[in-house]
Amino acid sequence: MTGRAVRAVRGAVQLERDDAEHMHERVGELLTAVLERNSLTADDLISIWFTATPDLHCDFPAAAARRLGIVDVPLICAQELDVAGAMPRVVRILAHTETELPRSAVQHVYLGAAAALRKDIAQ
């Protein structure tokens, strides 16, 4: 493939507790890993969707992106579906990017226990 294309990158992280500083740290780790593993910079980002499970109330996950210096990228937060038996305290992302990577080379990032959510695509 030559040239840049729009690609979507998925990721998730499970928090240990509903605490704003902890959320900022863990979501920051997730975003940093997504960028590093896919050789991306903040300039390559088009937008990021964040979802949080209904048991997280401490802050907006997007605040972690702003703390990392991702300030001119559209961000939005939403609540994940409240499904019985679902993993608790999870923040998920869907980042839209411009990259030269073919779709098959995109590395989706599931940190810690969240790797169990998508064993089929977690790197």
Image: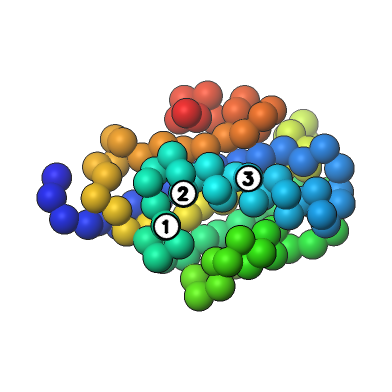
Please, is residue 30 above or below residue 63 in the view?
Answer: above
Can you tell which mark lies on residue 35?
A: 2
Could you tell me the amino acid type at mark 3?
Answer: Glu
Q: Circle 1 is placed at which residue position?
A: 41
Mark 1 nearby-residue class (10 Å; few <14, some 14–19, many ≥20): some
| Residue 117 falls left or right of residue 52 | left
Instruction: Please provide percent x and percent y for residue 57.
Output: 84, 58
Percent x, y of residue 48: 52, 61
- Residue 86 in view here: yes
Secondary structure category for the residue under label 3? helix
Q: Eyeballing the image, is 123 above or below 15?
A: above
Residue pointed to by mark 3: 29
Q: Residue at x 66, y 49 (%)?
A: 27
- Element carrying mark 1: loop
Q: CA distance from mark 1 to mark 2?
A: 6 Å
Q: Is residue 120 above or below residue 83?
A: above
Question: Mark 1 or 3 closer to N-term?
Answer: 3
Callout 1 touching callout 2 (CB < 8 Å):
yes
